[in-house]
Image: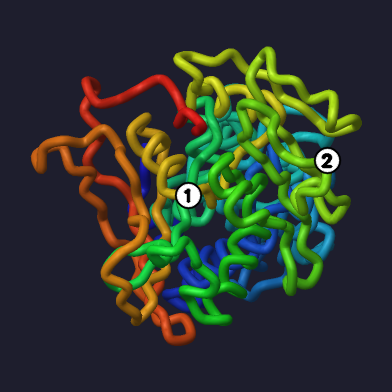
């Protein structure tokens, strides 16, 4: 059962806001793992001693490595005994490449565990129950919304069985993604472009379609982010028309070329191919996402053009929208979003704006859908290439 304030009975001499401070610190720590823990979640942990002082911190740094609780317990040492562990996700209860964190917390002698989000993974859940069975006060739901927001990609992937998708676009204030002659460099400021590299570094994969590949020859690798793990570059090119000289095929980052089942890719030896069936010349969006999930991809940064974005939106496969709006007007040229199968205002995909900030000279708006695309408007396929 969710507890509103699971540490209300914390030591009387501890500061009243100690629990909130510790959990928010754990949430900050968890974010350091974005882009490097897949297919595992990002998790942060803070250990406080009996007086409420922080004695250990840790976060899950990479898949296969120690979990956040283990790092924090190692930092705390003997000071963890009799203390409290604040964890952004329910401590795991199974043995995979590492041991169960619930058992590590028990052996360390902590007396209380406060976690924010219950683990939805059926293979790992149950840590709270194990802790309570060992006599440890373990309660969940504290600052749940804040912790869930920081781990939303992994949580979405577990709940839906597909990667979490963020659609990023850049446009002028009148919604144009390029000028009438097709030129689009640069609509946004250098600061916005640097910000995009930061977001790429937090994702497992960056995805573009054939139109963008042909028009822009994008590189898609992360630049200017120290210590970044390069995301998988995914090029959706049903006919395998990509030339061997395409920048996305260099060795700066791994690349996956998604093509139709019968596409002739003999001119691209050594390229990692994912062949998928075509439906009316298209690849099904959810077929693609399912196969990416099987490969361990838990978050996709969709940078494709307006046609690909429209197909994903129409398929109900956009979980977050990040738009960079430049203070410029073009009056003509392609719109940021093409046909998404919506013909009536009643079927508009309404968004909840979660953030609006100035980046350089631009405005970055982050929003999440609050209205599902009607079932009658959901197609099965990605856009057909022309």
Label 2, label 1: how many angstroms apart (C-alpha)?
Answer: 35 Å
Q: In the drawing, does residue 111 fall left or right of residue 279? A: right
The residue at which mark 1 appears reads as 305
**Residue closer to the observer: 116 or 173:** 173
Residue 314 in percent (x, y) is at 33, 33
Q: In the drawing, does residue 245 fall left or right of residue 52? A: right
Looking at marks 2 and 1 on the same chain, the residue that comes earlier in the sequence is marked by: 2
Name the residue rendered at 78%, 25% in the picture: 265
Q: Residue furthest bottom?
A: 361
The quarter holding residue 269 reads top right
Q: In the drawing, does residue 320 fall left or right of residue 151? A: left
Q: Is residue 84 visible?
A: no
Q: So how many labels did they put on this image? A: 2
Name the residue rendered at 53%, 29% in the picture: 162
The residue at which mark 2 appears reads as 64
**Residue closer to the observer: 289 or 21:** 289
Q: In the drawing, does residue 130 fall left or right of residue 79? A: left
Residue 31 in percent (x, y) is at 61, 61
Q: Nearer the viewer, mark 2 or mark 1?
A: 1
Q: Is 359 above or below relative to 72?
A: below
The quarter holding residue 277 reads top right
Question: Which class describes the residues within 10 Å of circle 2: few (<14), some (14-19), or many (20+)?
Answer: some
């Amino acid at each position: 059962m969710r507890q509103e304030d699971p540490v209300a009975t914390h030591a009387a001499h501890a500061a009243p806001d100690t629990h909130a401070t510790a959990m928010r610190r754990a949430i900050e720590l968890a974010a350091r793992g974005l882009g490097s823990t897949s297919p595992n979640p990002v998790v942060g942990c803070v250990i406080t001693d009996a007086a409420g002082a922080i004695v250990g911190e840790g976060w899950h740094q990479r898949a296969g490595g120690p979990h956040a609780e283990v790092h924090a317990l190692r930092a705390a040492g003997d000071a963890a005994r009799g203390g409290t562990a604040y964890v952004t996700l329910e401590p795991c209860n199974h043995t995979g490449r590492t041991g169960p964190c619930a058992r590590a917390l028990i052996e360390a002698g902590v007396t209380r565990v406060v976690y924010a989000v219950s683990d939805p993974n059926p293979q790992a859940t149950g840590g709270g129950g194990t802790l309570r069975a060992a006599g440890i006060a373990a309660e969940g739901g504290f600052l749940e919304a804040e912790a869930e927001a920081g781990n939303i990609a992994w949580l979405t992937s577990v709940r839906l069985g597909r990667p979490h998708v963020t659609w990023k676009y850049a446009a002028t204030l009148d919604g144009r993604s390029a000028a009438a002659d097709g030129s689009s460099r640069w609509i946004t400021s250098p600061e916005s472009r640097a910000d995009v590299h930061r977001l790429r570094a937090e994702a497992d994969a960056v995805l573009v379609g054939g139109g963008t590949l042909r028009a822009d020859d994008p590189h898609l690798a992360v630049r200017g982010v120290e210590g970044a793990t390069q995301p998988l570059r995914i090029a959706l090119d049903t006919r395998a028309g990509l030339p061997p000289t395409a920048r996305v095929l260099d060795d700066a980052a791994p690349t996956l070329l998604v093509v139709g089942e019968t596409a002739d890719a003999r001119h691209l030896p050594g390229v990692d191919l994912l062949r998928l069936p075509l439906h009316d010349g298209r690849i099904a969006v959810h077929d693609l996402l399912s196969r990416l999930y099987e490969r361990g991809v838990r978050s996709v940064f969709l940078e494709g053009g307006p046609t690909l974005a429209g197909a994903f939106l129409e398929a109900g496969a956009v979980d977050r929208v990040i738009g960079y709006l430049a203070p410029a007007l073009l009056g003509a040229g392609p719109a940021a979003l093409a046909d998404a199968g919506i013909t009536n205002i009643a079927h508009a995909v309404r968004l909840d704006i979660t953030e609006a900030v100035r980046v350089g000279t631009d405005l970055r708006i982050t929003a999440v859908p609050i209205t599902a695309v009607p079932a009658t408007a959901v197609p099965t396929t990605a856009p057909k290439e022309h």
